[in-house]
């Protein structure tokens, strides 16, 4: 296949592009390099089955030209990271809604199958665990910008499913749950690269809130495997899939584990949410995926143990700290 990957220079996009090329596919990588980094694609530079295009998904002419040249599209380009989302809500809504609309409209014109990356954020603050794909969603008020992200991605999902129903567009939706691994940066607030860098530098490890909130962390290597499989799985068309692991950990236990595995002397400090984010910030107390549907469709789910994930992230952060400043 020739696959158009939007957001290809991002953390997930770069791992996905590498896997697609390794499996014999051709990747057309589109990224505006706003949060993605060209260095993430260094391993594919000059590869005969890879082409990088610097550009914006809001550029319909460009998207149409690239889509015309491809057999399928994985749409990953989006505003990313809670910190960025809270600080730049207009950018978040416009990027997530307008760009997805252009990608879906163009794909429908060309009849190209689309895999749309969505997020566990769409479940919002529901206290149910685990989350199943057909569960109700429960979002906070429009005055809290965090929910703009969940709402914009939920709208993307609705739009994608509407294109599937009305125009027969083959779409598959993946809801990623806390995907982590090498190349993820802590710059946009993600917890694991942040803790790893803090532990290695001997800085305080900053746990927000009580630290009793839980997450399930999936290795990006497993997640992109699932994405490629879903892209070619006929039974996945028109459906939504949770993609994540079931290994649940509290954020304070995560801090302890990172500290131990890094053999770090960093203190673990607790920071109130209002200091870490904007006033009125609401966090999710618990976020666990039900991955039954993914297991049934593919016969596998992400399962790399958390300690192995932490070690990979520590190794990546160590490399960055040792690298000479760019
Ligand atoms: N978090 C933390 N310290 C940090 C960054 C994040 O305690 O330096 C917490 C954050 O409040 C949340 C969890 O870690 O409860 C996961 O945060 P992340 O932004 O990685 O993902 P998400 O909130 O989307 O699950």
Image (cartoon, rainbow, N blue to C red):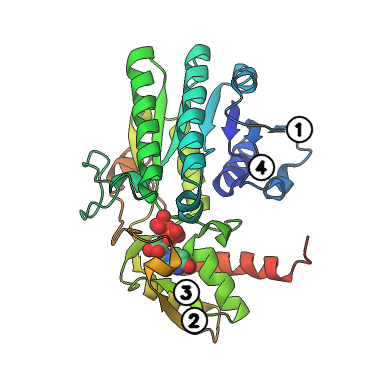
Asked if marks 3 and 1 touch (Cβ < 8 Å), the reply is no
Asked if marks 2 and 1 touch (Cβ < 8 Å), the reply is no
Q: Residue 132, relative to residue 130: is it above or below?
A: above
Answer with left or right where residue 53 lies relative to residue 245. right
Distance from mark 3 CB to nearest ligand 1 atom below 8 Å: yes
Place of residue 27 in the rendered image (x, y in percent of width and height, measured from the top left): 64, 32
- The quadrant holding residue 155 is top left
Sequence-first disc among 4 and 2: 4
Q: Which mark is residue 33?
A: 4
Q: Nearer the viewer, residue 229 or 30?
A: 30
Place of residue 137 in the rendered image (x, y in percent of width and height, measured from the top left): 25, 43
Q: Secondary structure at mark 3?
A: strand
3 vs 1, front mark:
3
Q: Residue at x 58, y 69 (%)?
A: 314
Q: CA distance from mark 2 to mark 1?
A: 43 Å
Q: CA distance from mark 2 to mark 3?
A: 15 Å
The residue to which callout 2 is attached is: 260
1 vs 4, front mark:
4
Sequence-first disc among 3 and 4: 4
The residue to which callout 1 is attached is: 48
Q: Outermost residue, bottom direction?
A: 265
Asked whether residue 178 appears in the rendered view, the answer is yes
Q: CA distance from mark 3 to mark 1?
A: 44 Å
Q: Residues within 10 Å of mark 4 (few under 14, many from 20)?
A: some
Distance from mark 4 CB to nearest ligand 1 atom below 8 Å: no
Place of residue 18 in the rendered image (x, y in percent of width and height, measured from the top left): 63, 43
Q: Secondary structure at mark 4?
A: loop
Q: Quadrant of the N terminus?
A: top right
Q: Residue 189, relative to residue 77: is it above or below?
A: below
Asked whether residue 309 appears in the rendered view, the answer is no
Q: Residue at x 51, y 25 (%)?
A: 103
The residue to which callout 3 is attached is: 206
């Amino acid at each position: 296949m020739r696959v158009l990957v939007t957001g290809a220079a991002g953390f997930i996009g770069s791992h996905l592009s590498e896997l697609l090329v390794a499996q014999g596919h051709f990747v057309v990588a589109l990224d505006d390099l706003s949060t993605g980094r060209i260095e993430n694609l260094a391993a594919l530079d000059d590869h005969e089955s890879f082409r990088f295009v610097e550009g914006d998904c809001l550029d319909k002419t460009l998207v149409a030209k690239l889509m015309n040249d491809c057999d399928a599209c994985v749409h990953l380009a989006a505003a990313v990271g809670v910190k960025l989302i809270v600080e730049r809500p207009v950018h978040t809504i416009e990027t997530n809604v307008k760009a997805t609309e252009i990608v879906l409209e163009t794909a429908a014109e060309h009849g190209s199958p689309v895999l749309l990356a969505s997020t566990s954020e769409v479940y919002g603050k529901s206290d149910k665990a685990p989350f199943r794909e057909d569960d109700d969603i429960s979002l906070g008020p429009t005055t809290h910008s965090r929910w703009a992200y969940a709402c914009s991605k939920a709208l993307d999902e609705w739009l994608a499913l509407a294109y599937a129903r009305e125009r027969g567009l083959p779409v598959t939706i993946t809801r990623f749950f806390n995907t982590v691994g090498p190349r993820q940066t802590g710059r946009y607030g993600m917890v694991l690269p942040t803790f790893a860098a803090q532990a290695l530098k001997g800085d305080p490890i900053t746990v927000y809130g009580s630290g009793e909130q839980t997450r399930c962390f999936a290795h990006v290597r497993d997640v992109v495997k699932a994405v490629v499989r879903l892209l070619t799985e006929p039974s996945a068309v028109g459906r939504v899939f949770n993609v994540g692991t079931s290994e649940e950990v509290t954020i304070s236990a995560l801090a302890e584990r990172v500290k131990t595995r890094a053999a770090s002397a960093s203190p673990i400090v607790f920071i109130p949410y209002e200091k870490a984010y904007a006033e009125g910030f609401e966090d999710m107390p618990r976020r666990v995926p039900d991955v039954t549907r993914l297991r049934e469709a593919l016969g596998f789910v992400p399962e790399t143990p958390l300690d192995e994930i932490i070690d990979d992230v520590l190794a990546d952060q160590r490399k960055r700290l040792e690298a000479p400043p760019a």
